[in-house]
Image (cartoon, grey):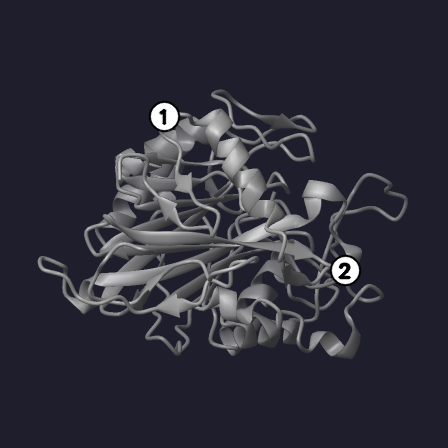
């Protein structure tokens, strides 16, 4: 077991992003088509949503522009696997196809690999056949910056693939390129956009992150985060893995003997504790979305990038997307969209003109959440069921 890494320095982020560590370790041990006055996100017209920003006219009673923030999020990101399975040209242009779709006030992703040199402490033995470990060169953090990312989540099953040193190297690599990170047990990351402060915390079933299994402790983390910002976003790696794991049902999900949490119970408990948006990933497939108390739960955003063929792009395993959400500073819904992507033959994220991911999310949402599910139209626009 490894102790959670801590960072002692505060980088200067380009969107006035401030990295804040809450004193939470002791707590864990103890147990867009809406008419608004600011830019909101809506899907582009025609086949293949672009997710381009549009400004809608003001309406009577609309909140001031400074009270709305736009967020975008993706599922699992692997840019390659050093030393021999890396994209050409040093990874330059890896995210070129999706950069416009990602654009938002705060752009978040789930970084499913360390950015580090080989620390000599890889988790897989020399003769392993069912063990997977990943890493990309530290300088690959520049590709995340160039794509527009602001914050990367490390709370997942590959965060410690190269031990505590690899984890810390990843943090330093991200900070070097003005990128925030979240995921350690005593870490809450506060970012600011359009005058709105957003606290982000990462959860998984592993000791190097806040626990998705210990819901009592997790609620304390979210409650603390709510005192630090206007909005709270939960990044959570939860649920069993595989092409057949698209459905969301109540109860604990197990994978290879691991408790991967109870996604429904966890997500709703976090909203009860003060979360305004739940961003799920981990199953490597897309899952449905529902609203609870006016807050969106995206149970899994699937695979976004698998450079070097590190992630299977076979069928629905290759489908992902960009979730965009606009929230008012009180957490209320102001619009959203889902833009379909897929991993091409090289594992790069690519806009999908056939909108296969959107079609799957719509189908799963109707099946799993007939009353509480998000309503998604053919352009990817998301609205609450009672809108």
Q: Nearer the viewer, residue 358 or 156?
A: 358
Which residue is found at the position 21% from the left and 67% from the top?
Answer: 57
User: Judging from the image, what secondary structure is the residue with disc 2 in?
Assistant: loop
Could you tell whether 354 is left or right of 35 in the image? right
| Residue sticking out furthest to the top | 251
Q: CA distance from mark 1 to mark 2?
A: 51 Å
Q: Which quadrant holds the C terminus?
A: top left
Could you tell whether 61 is left or right of 345 in the image? left
- The answer to whether one can see residue 217 in this image is no
Q: Which quadrant holds the N terminus?
A: top right
Q: Position of residue 6 (x, y in %)?
A: 47, 60
- In the rendered image, which residue does mark 2 sit on? 120
Could you tell whether 27 is left or right of 206 in the image? left
Q: Position of residue 321 (x, y in %)?
A: 55, 53
Q: Which circle marks residue 221 in the picture?
A: none
Q: Quadrant of residue 93?
A: bottom right
Could you tell whether 154 is left or right of 160 in the image? left
Which residue is found at the position 60% from the left and 32% from the top?
Answer: 246
Q: Position of residue 349 (x, y in %)?
A: 65, 61
User: Judging from the image, what secondary structure is the residue with disc 1 in?
Assistant: loop
Q: Nearer the viewer, residue 72 or 173?
A: 72
Q: Which circle marks residue 371 in the picture?
A: 1
Q: Where is 155 relative to 78, above or below?
A: above
Which numbered mark, 1 or 2, is in the foreground of this view?
A: 1
| Residues at discs 1 and 2 in contact (Cβ within 8 Å) | no
Q: Nearer the viewer, residue 192 or 379?
A: 379
- The answer to whether one can see residue 108 in this image is yes
Q: Where is 277 relative to 299, above or below?
A: below
Crowd tier of the residue under label 2, counting other residues whose Cα lies within 10 Å: few below 14, some 14–19, many 20 or above: few
Crowd tier of the residue under label 1, counting other residues whose Cα lies within 10 Å: few below 14, some 14–19, many 20 or above: few
How many numbered discs? 2
């Amino acid at each position: 077991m490894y102790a959670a890494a801590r960072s002692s320095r505060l980088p200067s982020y380009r969107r006035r992003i401030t990295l804040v560590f809450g004193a939470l370790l002791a707590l864990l041990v103890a147990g867009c088509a809406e008419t608004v006055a600011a830019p909101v996100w809506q899907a582009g017209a025609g086949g293949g949503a672009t997710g381009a920003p549009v400004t809608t006219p003001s309406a009577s009673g609309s909140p001031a522009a400074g009270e709305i923030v736009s967020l975008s999020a993706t599922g699992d990101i692997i840019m390659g696997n050093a030393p021999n399975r890396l994209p050409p040209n040093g990874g330059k242009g890896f995210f070129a196809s999706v950069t416009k779709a990602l654009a938002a006030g705060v752009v978040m992703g789930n970084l499913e690999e360390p950015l580090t040199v080989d620390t000599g402490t890889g988790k897989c033995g020399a003769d392993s056949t069912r063990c997977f470990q990943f890493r990309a060169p530290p300088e690959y953090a520049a590709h995340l910056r160039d794509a527009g990312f602001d914050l990367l989540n490390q709370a997942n099953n590959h965060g410690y693939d190269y031990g505590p040193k690899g984890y810390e190297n990843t943090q330093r690599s991200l900070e070097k390129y003005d990128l925030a990170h979240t995921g350690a047990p005593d870490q809450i990351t506060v970012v600011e956009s359009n005058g709105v402060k957003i606290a982000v915390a990462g959860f998984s079933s592993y000791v190097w992150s806040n626990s998705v299994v210990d819901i009592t402790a997790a609620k304390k983390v979210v409650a603390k985060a709510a005192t630090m910002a206007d909005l709270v976003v939960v990044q959570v790696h939860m649920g069993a893995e595989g092409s057949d794991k698209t459905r969301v049902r109540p109860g604990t999900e197990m994978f290879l003997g691991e408790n991967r949490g109870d996604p429904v119970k966890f997500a709703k408990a976090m909203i009860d504790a003060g979360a305004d948006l739940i961003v799920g990933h981990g199953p490597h497939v897309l899952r449905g979305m529902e609203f609870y108390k006016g807050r969106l739960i995206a149970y899994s955003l699937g695979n976004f990038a698998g450079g070097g063929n590190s992630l299977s792009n076979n069928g629905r395993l290759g489908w992902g997307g960009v979730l965009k959400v606009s929230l008012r500073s009180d957490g209320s819904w102001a619009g959203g969209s889902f833009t379909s992507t897929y991993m091409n033959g090289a594992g790069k994220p690519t806009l999908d003109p056939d909108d296969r991911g959107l079609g799957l999310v719509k189908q799963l949402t109707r099946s799993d959440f007939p009353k509480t599910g998000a309503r998604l139209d053919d352009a990817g626009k998301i609205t609450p069921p009672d809108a």
